[in-house]
Image: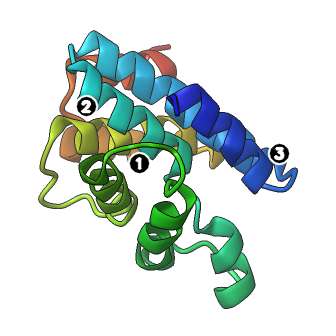
Amino acid sequence: MTAAEIARKMVSYSNGNRHDINHFMKVCAFAKTIGECEGLDRPTQTILEIAAIVHDIACPLCREKYGNTNGKYQEQEGPALVRSFLADTGLSQDAVDRIAWLVGHHHTLQSIDGLDYQILIEADYLVNADESQYSRENVENTLERVFRTRTGIHLLKSMYLEE
């Protein structure tokens, strides 16, 4: 299955929750842009795009089970949901393992290992900054502490810091 087909499947999985659907589609678009501009190889780019699509797969469960979508709950519940969701997609076990691992760490900003992980963090932040209307101070702090890719830095500055 392609990333686009997995996105279509994820839209159905989201049961009409337009906020969730719009969020993961935007994160996927930013991840695709950053990954391609940073020169990711095709297999890593595909893993990144699929991880961006499913990164918040645990949100519906977390809302029901915990009453919120706290990032730590998402990281705890997400990997098993990802494995089940991707079971019939034809992806390799290594790809599914990496995607599940990324979903299980997408709110952890320490010890980022791999460009796919870095880009997923950056893409999710770019969307969250808009959706949650983060302060300029928050954006500046995150730029300094978290962003590392040339493309992600450019997008963040262009969208939130340039007048």
Q: Position of residue 22 (x, y in %)?
A: 72, 38
Closer-to-camera residue (130/113): 113
- Circle number at residue 60: none
Residue at the disc numbered 1: 138
Disc 2 and disc 1: Cα gap in Å? 29 Å
Closer-to-camera residue (25/155): 25
Which callout, 2 or 1, points at the residue further toward the start of the chain?
2
Residue at the disc numbered 3: 18
Which callout, 2 or 3, points at the residue further toward the start of the chain?
3
Q: Is residue 120 above or below residue 148?
A: below
Local packing at callout 3 (Cα closer than 10 Å; few below 14, some 14-19, many 20+) is few
Q: Position of residue 88 (x, y in %)?
A: 54, 52
Q: Is residue 37 above or below residue 130?
A: above
Closer-to-camera residue (47/86): 86
Task: Tell me if 133 is positioned left or right of 19 in this view.
Answer: left
Q: Is residue 124 visible?
A: no
Q: Quadrant of residue 128?
A: top right
Between label 2 and label 1, give the one nearer the viewer: 2
Q: Amino acid at mark 1?
A: Asn
Q: Secondary structure at mark 2?
A: helix
Between label 2 and label 3, give the one nearer the viewer: 2
Q: Amino acid at mark 3?
A: Arg
Q: Quadrant of residue 158?
A: top left
Residue at the disc numbered 2: 44
Q: Is residue 106 visible?
A: yes
Q: Amino acid at mark 2?
A: Thr
Q: Position of residue 144 (x, y in %)?
A: 21, 40
At 61% from the left and 72% from the top, the residue drawn is 69
Which callout, 1 or 3, points at the residue further toward the start of the chain?
3
